[in-house]
């Protein structure tokens, strides 16, 4: 349950898909809202595909077990891979992100290349390690540099 709450809280800080309802507006309870069309860009599609495939990798890899959610930021024009782990120290979180970068990200980007014909390189992905118990950013990896969270 904590993980679900962590994902929900973190997702509120990520820019929404164009046309999606603001978190501050009252959500519609009408079933017809599910039939409304919204514009998606390839970044949105890649993020959704990577998130789905990350759960497959997680359940079959035996080596990387932290949940991963990938979103697309239209503001920065980058994919954001959010790793929800249990580590609290900066160095251990860096180690986990490095493992994600070298072992998991190449599988996710290869999947997008095969499924959607889009080549994504590491420079297009921000990686964020969040402590799933505290919903706290520990460290992020952007442009090959680690930045300690606030």
Image (tube, rainbow, N blue to C red):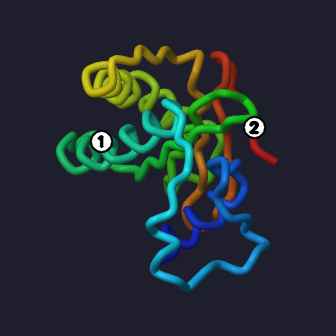
Residue 87 shown left or right of residue 139 in the figure: left
Q: Nearer the viewer, residue 95 or 137?
A: 137
Q: Earlier in the sequence, mark 2 or mark 1?
A: 1
- Residue at numbered disc 2: 148
Residue 119 spot, x, y in % from top left: 41, 14
Note whether 74 is above or below 13 in the view shown: above
- Tag 1 residue: 53
- Is the residue marked by circle 1 packed among few (<14), some (14-19), or many (20+) residues within 10 Å? some
Q: Quadrant of residue 6?
A: bottom right
Secondary element type, mark 1: helix
Note whether 12 is above or below 71 in the view shown.
below
| Residue found at x 43% / y 33% | 46
**Of helix, strand and loop, which one carries label 2?**
strand
Q: CA distance from mark 2 to mark 1?
A: 27 Å
Please provide percent x and percent y for residue 99. 42, 30
- The mark tally for this picture is 2
Residue extending farthest bottom = 29
Most foreground residue, 86 or 110:
110
Which quadrant of the figure has residue 125? top right
Quarter of the rendering containing residue 80: top right
Neighbours of disc 2 within 10 Å: few (<14), some (14-19), many (20+)? some
Which dot, 2 or 1, sits closer to the camera?
A: 1
Does residue 87 appear to the left or right of 143 in the view shown?
Answer: left
Tell me: 117 left or right of 74.
left
Give the image location of residue 121, x and y in percent.
49, 14
Q: Is residue 132 above or below residue 1?
A: above
* Residue 93 placement (x, y as % from top left): 57, 41
For image coordinates 62% across by 58% down, the residue present is 11
Whether 93 is drawn above or below 86: the answer is: above
């Amino acid at each position: 349950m904590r993980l679900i709450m962590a994902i929900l809280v973190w997702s509120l800080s990520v820019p929404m898909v164009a046309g999606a309802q603001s978190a501050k507006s009252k959500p519609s309870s009408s079933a017809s809202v599910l039939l409304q069309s919204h514009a998606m860009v390839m970044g949105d599609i890649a993020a959704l595909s990577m998130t789905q495939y990350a759960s497959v990798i997680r359940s079959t890899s035996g080596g990387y077990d932290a949940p991963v959610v990938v979103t697309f930021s239209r503001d920065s024009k980058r994919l954001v891979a959010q790793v929800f782990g249990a580590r609290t120290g900066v160095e251990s979180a860096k180690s986990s992100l490095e493992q994600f970068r070298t072992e998991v990200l190449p599988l996710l980007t290869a999947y997008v290349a095969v499924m959607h014909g889009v080549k994504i390189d590491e420079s297009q992905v921000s990686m964020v390690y969040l402590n799933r118990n505290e919903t706290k950013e520990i460290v992020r990896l952007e442009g090959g540099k680690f930045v300690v969270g606030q």
